[in-house]
Amino acid sequence: MTVVKGEIDRRPRRFYKSAGVAPSEGGWAVSLDGKPLRTPARRGLVAPTEALAEVLAGEWREQGDRIDFATMHANRLANVALDRTPESRAGLAAEAARYAETDLVSHLADAPPLLRQLQEATWTPLRDWAGEALGVRLIPVVGIIAARQPAESIEAVRRHAEGLDDFRLTAFLHAVSLFGSVVIGLAVEQRKLTAVAGHEASLVDETFQASLWGEDAEAVRRRDCARAEARTLDLWFDAVGASVRPEGAT
């Protein structure tokens, strides 16, 4: 966050010296100056792996004199995973499945030819992979009007999402929303693709248009913010993939 000269900085001042992690029931707890953190719903901020707990603690360590919660993408995801996802799993899985009906990578441009070539080169391998690896076979269409996608493919997305644990499901849904594509979200969650690469794949149209006409400052800001969230998703999925649990955890 950039504070404009003359504006009042309303971000809270940093009130702690250190952030750490320690074994806890159910995983690894994050603490500030030795005091365990809690979510907005007053649950303990406990990650399933030490690696993810370190990602969360790292965001607290990186804060300056003021705490900028807008930069703490992983902590926001963790709060959702602990406070909201457990009671919303079916709805989140259904939401992911709905993205398959109008997936970004299924909508191809009719013109110009170069844009169509870029879309095909970037998105076709991802669609093919999703179909072969996960049974999510989506039919590409030309234009913005959606085509009816195979019911079994939509159901495959729903089943896959329901099979994820709360922390993976939370990040998966965030990836799908960020990229506008369940196919890219699946590729990122399965580590077929990094989230940063997934972000670039989702911007084929925008990047092409920017190469022709340039882009304004607001577009650059939005892209940079989304890229920062993508980098956090990479840290998150790599961390939850580490299955080592602390001794004595249940």
Image (cartoon, helix red, strand yellow):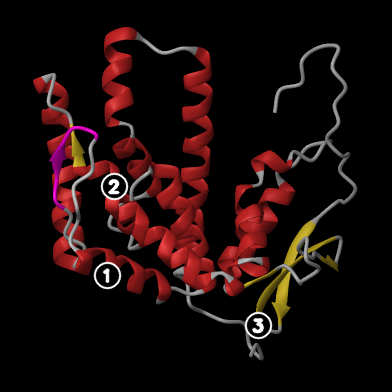
Callout 3: SS? loop
Q: Amino acid at mark 1?
A: Ala
Nearest to viewer (mark 1 / mark 3): 1
Q: Which residue is mark 2?
A: 103
Q: Amino acid at mark 3?
A: Gly
Callout 2: SS? loop
- What crowding class fits label 1: few (fewer than 14 Cα within 10 Å), some (14-19), or many (20 or more)? some
Q: Amino acid at mark 2?
A: Asp
Is residue 171 visible in this depiction of the protein?
Answer: yes
Mark 2 → mark 1, Cα distance in angstroms: 14 Å
Residue 202 lies, with reference to residue 129, above or below; the image says above
Asked if the stretch drawn in magenta spans residue 165, the answer is: no
Q: Where residue 103 sits in the image (x, y, percent)?
A: 28, 47
- Magenta segment: 139-144
Q: Is residue 37 left or right of residue 72?
A: right
Q: Which residue is mark 1?
A: 156
Query: Which circle's residue, 3 or 2, is located before the other in the chain?
Result: 3
Mark 3 → mark 2, Cα distance in angstroms: 36 Å
In the picture, residue 108 is in which quadrant? top left
In the picture, residue 35 is in which quadrant? bottom right
In the picture, residue 98 is in which quadrant? bottom left
